[in-house]
Image (cartoon, rainbow, N blue to C red):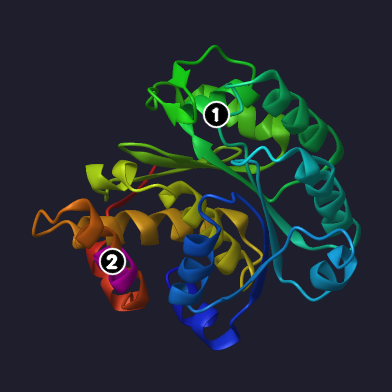
Amino acid sequence: MYELISKVGKASPLVVHYTNEVTINDCANMTLAIGASPLMSYSYEELEDVINIASTVVINIGTMNSSHLDLFVKAAKYANKVGKKLVLDPVGVFASKKRQEIIKILLGEVKFDVIKGNMAEIKFIGGQAVNGQGVDSHEECDDIDQLKAISKTLKTTLAITGKTDVIVDFDNVVKIHNGSPKLKSVTGTGCMINSLIGSFLGVSDNSMDAAVMGILCMSLSGELADKDDLGIGSFKVNLFDNIYKLTEEKIRDLGKVETI
């Protein structure tokens, strides 16, 4: 699994993003920092062309621009049609009826390799009551069996961020204990995890490994970036620097990964 960091750098897989307008620039730069190649699009006209050459497609509903909603569905369905790997981030799905509607369509018509979200988002799409506000979660992991059931129902790998990150693939569970509270204070770190997962999916057929590596790289880099208790602006710069300088050896040595 840890060797994926080198594989990304060598292969530079193309990750096509249909993503959050607030964080699109950071997602592109995060993809580059890990060694992959980003392509950001909101175009119907080039949809088939860019997905045909992609390794992975990321769908992120963080910015609910009305003109993009049908595009998200069309892009995801076409990615399925031509066998491209898919990552979904149901950002703030519990916040509005329209977010719930678009996610219901996507989950009903598209097969995703990985669904990444915070605990409230994942529990909500699994039919559970949640404690969330806006796009933020006040939930933490409290029932692994419930998460296994959601993974099996949706037939996908769940990548769940929080104080303790949890990755669930049917009955396989990994917890990641790296991180920094400042990751919640920088807009877009969750969106950037999609870019990392998408990058690793581009060089791996194992969605669980890609999800673990995507979250681990962000959590570990956040921990390293915060070692001198930097202010938020400096922390964000240092976060990107640490992502860029990650190596297989560093991830093996410093990653706090627990297999359940």
Say which of 56 and 42 sits in front. Answer: 42
Q: Position of residue 40 (x, y in %)?
A: 66, 65
Q: Position of residue 105 (x, y in %)?
A: 82, 32
Residue drawn where x is 73% and y is 32% of the image: 103
Secondary structure at numbered mark 2: helix
The residue identified by callout 2 is 237
Q: From which residue to which does the magenta span run?
A: 237-242
* Residue 243 horizontal side relative to residue 43, left or right: left
- Would you call the spot at circle 2 few (<14 residues within 10 Å), some (14-19), or many (20 or more)? few
Q: Position of residue 220 (x, y in %)?
A: 29, 59
* Residue 179 horizontal side relative to residue 125, left or right: left
| Vertical order, 137 against 3 (above or below) | above
Say which of 86 and 102 sits in front. Answer: 102
Residue drawn where x is 87% and y is 72% of the image: 49
State which quadrant residue 11 falls in: bottom right
* Residue 103 horizontal side relative to residue 183, left or right: right
- What numbered label is drawn on residue 137? none
The amino acid type, in three-letter code, at marker 1 is Glu
State which quadrant residue 201 falls in: bottom right
Which residue appears farthest toward the top when viewing the image?
Answer: 129
The amino acid type, in three-letter code, at marker 2 is Val
The residue identified by callout 1 is 121
Residue drawn where x is 37% and y is 57% of the image: 218
Q: Earlier in the sequence, mark 2 or mark 1?
A: 1
Magenta span includes 184? no
